[in-house]
Amino acid sequence: MEQIQHKFVTVRGLKFHIAELGNGSNVVLFLHGFPEIWYSWRHQMIALANAGFRTLAPDYRGYGLSDIPPEPEKATFVDIVTDLVAILDHLGVTKVFVVAKDFGARPAYLLTLLHPDRVSGIVTLGVPHVPLEPQKRGESLPEGFYMSRWREPGRAEADFGRFDAKTVVRNIYILFSRSEIPIAAENQEIMDLVDTSIPLPPWFTEEDLATYGALYEKSGFKTALQVPYRSFAEDFGIADPIVKVPALLIMGCKDYVFKFHGMEEYIKFGKAKELVPNLDIIYLPEGTHFVQEQSPELVNELILDFLQGHV
């Protein structure tokens, strides 16, 4: 891990942290999800750099070691995409492969649709490309659905505020590693769904948790709650939503995302390929929502196979 280099670049009035490894001519841009950070790509950065790729893993605005925007409650997905383009321009990178996890799939595909000349191909983990129309997720789920709770201004802040950042990350990792959607009862908050006696997943160490905890202690959760959870109604004004570049979706069969209304049908019965015609899908039988950390060697191999087939 020590070989990963860290730099800061200032664009659009904010200082962004970027983890970097490798010096190949083909560049891979890693986009994290929540409650993740650049560190969630540690295994993949090393493997791809060893295979001759240059890897970049930024922290989004308001995440990790990047600056918190002056008004985090106004942050948007378009901000993230515009930040990414500015970072690539600053680094002199004209074109990238994008590897994205969880909600990182949205800026990954937005980058491709808004700046098609900048992306050679896309790999997403845990989340497919879905229609970009303004939407509210979870209408068919109970009031205690975690995304509904976190979308409500102030509610998650009060819930998370009862604990230190390390405990919040610990609880979310445990919840999101399960195959069921986190849903709280009427008299519960989402953090109450995790018993303190439940151990971390075996592939996630106390050292990993301490790293995440320190980063979220620095950034807090305000921007992370705004993007993604309070930004899904954003209208991007994209006339043609069809993605032209080759793409790969890696899904763990035990990922709770499959329990979202209509998601299993969308992924498994061809609907996802309507928006991404050049999409391949690979299923990992024992995979959870965190496949890149749970099974890094397997995921590294799948990503490398895709990249090497399209360079």
Image (tube, helix red, strand yellow):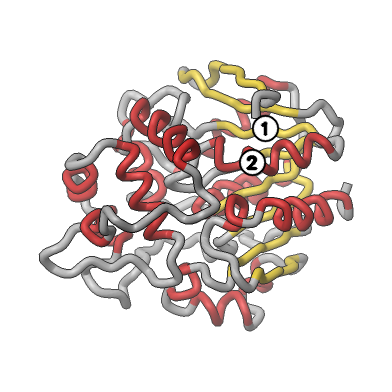
Residue positioned 25% across, 58% down in the render? 190
Residue positioned 74% across, 22% down in the render? 92
**Residue 101 placement (x, y as % from top left):** 57, 51
For disc 2, the marked residue is 30
**Residue 68 placement (x, y as % from top left):** 38, 26
Number of marks present in the image shown = 2
For disc 1, the marked residue is 56
**Type of the residue with mark 1:** Leu
**Which residue is at the front of the view, 293 or 148?**
293
Q: Quadrant of residue 160?
A: top left
Work out which residue is located at the far left of the displayed protein and give it. 187
**Residue 234 placement (x, y as % from top left):** 41, 51
Q: Is residue 81 above or below residue 287?
A: above
**Which residue is at the front of the view, 43 or 159?**
43
**Type of the residue with mark 2:** Phe
Whether residue 232 is visible to the viewer of this picture, yes or no, is: no
Disc 1, disc 2: CB below 8 Å? Answer: yes
| Residue 99 left/right relative to 156 | right
Q: Is residue 99 above or below residue 59?
A: below
